[in-house]
Image (cartoon, rainbow, N blue to C red):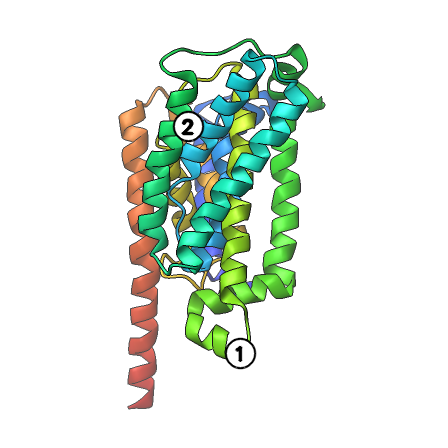
Amino acid sequence: MMKRLRSWEGFLLLVLMVIVAVSASTSPQFLTVGNQVNLFQLSIEKVIVALMMTFIIINAEIDLSVGSMMGLSACAFGWMVQQGVDAGLAIVICLAIGVVGGAVNGWFVTALGLPSLVVTLATLIGFRGLARVLVEDRGINAFPAWFNALGQQGLIGPLPFALVSFAVLFVLLYIVLEHSGFGRKTYVIGSNREVAEFAGIDTARHKMILFIGSGVISAFAGLLYAARVGAVRGDVAFGFELDIITIVLLGGVSIFGGAGTLVGTGLAILIVLNLRNGMALANITGHIQTGVIGILLIASVIVPRIRISLGRQAKSEAST
């Protein structure tokens, strides 16, 4: 426990405590249940996808297509409902689209050996193009009442379905990453793929599973977005991938793979959401909010490297 408190997660926890204390002192509304639920609700789709993105980046890959997959899933749902397809069946088809999209990314990365950065940049454009083809420039909002209620009303008290889904996914994925063979393989492959293959790990199969998981979670998040907003357009979730990756990197996940935790991602989520909400309540403009988040991201890259350099210097001095 003490080791974790002295780690990057401990630093993030300290930052979170400071943000909460300052925000609570400047606004009496900050700590109310309604405000806390609201700050999650407005970004819930991003933070759900960030959980799976943690696995992807720890595995030394990247998925830039998550925002476009969210948009494709949401637009496909809207188009199918407009065409008279049963909403329940449309949800299943949208999740299947996520499976196919993730498998396409995984196949190009594992079978052809292409960099995931290039592959998912291409599918980012492709998925977004398909979404715009389906809905063109119009908005679609003729959703069933139960679907809209799922995204806009509380499921357990004031907690909406999306927030409950996030909590369940976090617990399940935490167990997988920290306490299962699959999680250990994710770290090993991210640290050194050649060593992992030498140890008998099927790295291609593992990466394929991760990309399919990313596609399904993104499609699910797109449906949640459609339910929350009650309408879809071709630009649904446009640019979300950058916010998602920012959260994961701020949480201490190494962009080079092999390092990071879901706890760190969870703390980064809380920091970003509480910071944005606290500044909004203090009437600080969105541009300044983005600048502050950017500074935190830079710190998340620089501070660990400074700590590593100081540690190496201390060991060098101790040995001489």
Q: Which residue is mark 1?
A: 199
Residue plotted at (63% across, 31% down) = 92
User: Where on the picture, by quarter, is residue 169?
Assistant: top right
Q: Quick one: 203 or 7, which is closer to the camera?
A: 203
**Residue at figure coordinates x 34%, y 73% from the top left:** 311
158 above or below 168? above
**Percent of width and height locating residue 307:** 34, 65
Q: Is residue 94 above or below residue 268?
A: above
Mark 1 secondary-structure assignment: loop
How dense is the environment of label 1, judged by Cα within 10 Å: few (below 14), some, or many (20 and up)? few
- Residue 33 location (% of width, % of height): 61, 24
Task: Identify the residue at image location x=48%, y=51%.
Answer: 54
Upstream in sequence: badge 1 or badge 2: 1
Residue under pointer 2: 237
User: Disc 1 residue type?
Assistant: Ala
Q: Amino acid at mark 2?
A: Ala
Q: Which mark is residue 119?
A: none
In the foreground, 27 or 93: 93
Marks 1 and 2 close (CB-CB < 8 Å): no
Q: Is residue 186 above or below residue 217?
A: below
Q: Residue placed farthest to the right in the image? A: 156
Q: Residues within 10 Å of mark 2 (few under 14, many from 20)?
A: many
Residue 175: image x %, image y %? Answer: 65, 55
Quadrant of image for the C terminus: bottom left
Left or right of 214 in this view: 242:
left
Can you tell which of label 1 and label 2 is closer to the viewer? 1
Q: Is residue 261 left or right of residue 174?
A: left
